[in-house]
Image (spheres, grey):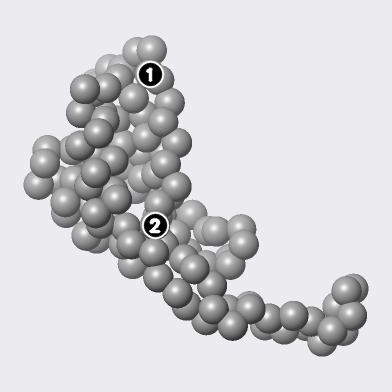
């Protein structure tokens, strides 16, 4: 069995949870915040049998798309590095997935 720690943008979560549910997968949803953009994202804990791992990863790839958005962070004109810099567009979305082997699993 594998535990997938899956980090996705908030706007991708409803579609991902629906697609996972349609294929019989369940997930635990945790609210989290990204470090770089400091915007909301969601961490999903997904338990899956190793033989079905590719199915889950396929759903995640199909559902969580990359997109571009404007830089939401304010420019600080007198920051340590001199003049503040601001990125015009940032690539966001997709998913970050960590796969961990599970030695024991019990549903009580």
Q: Secondary structure at mark 2?
A: loop
Instruction: State left or right for residue 87 relative to residue 15.
Output: right
- How far across and down, in percent of the image, does residue 107 sit? 24, 22
- How far across and down, in percent of the image, does residue 21 sit? 14, 46
- The residue lying at 49 percent from left, 54 percent from top is 32
- The residue lying at 42 percent from left, 41 percent from top is 97
- Decide: is 48 above or below 38: above
Residue 69 seen in this snapshot? yes
Q: Secondary structure at mark 1?
A: loop
* Residue 82 sits in quarter: bottom right
- How far across and down, in percent of the image, does residue 13 sit? 30, 58
- Decide: is 60 above or below 65: above
Residue, disc 2: 94
Distance from the alpha carbon under mark 2 to that under mark 1: 25 Å
For the N terminus, give its image quadrant: top left
For the C terminus, give its image quadrant: top left
Q: Residues within 10 Å of mark 1 (few under 14, many from 20)?
A: some
Instruction: State left or right for residue 91 relative to residue 37.
Output: left
Residue 72 seen in this snapshot? no
Residue, disc 1: 102
- How far across and down, in percent of the image, does residue 78 sit? 87, 84
2 or 1: mark nearer the eye: 2
Q: Earlier in the sequence, mark 2 or mark 1?
A: 2
Q: Nearer the viewer, residue 10 or 56?
A: 56
- The residue lying at 74 percent from left, 80 percent from top is 85
**Marker count (numbered):** 2
* Residue 71 sits in quarter: bottom right
Query: Furthest residue to the bottom?
Result: 77
């Amino acid at each position: 069995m594998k535990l997938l720690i899956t980090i996705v943008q908030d706007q991708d979560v409803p579609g991902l949870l629906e697609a996972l549910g349609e294929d019989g997968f369940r997930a635990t949803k945790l609210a989290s915040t990204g470090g770089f953009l400091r915007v909301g994202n969601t961490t999903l804990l997904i338990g899956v049998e190793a033989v079905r791992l590719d199915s889950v990863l396929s759903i995640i790839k199909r559902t969580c798309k990359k997109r571009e958005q404007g830089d939401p962070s304010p420019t600080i004109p007198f920051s340590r590095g001199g003049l503040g810099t601001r990125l015009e567009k940032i690539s966001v979305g997709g998913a970050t997935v960590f796969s961990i082997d599970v030695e024991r699993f019990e549903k009580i």
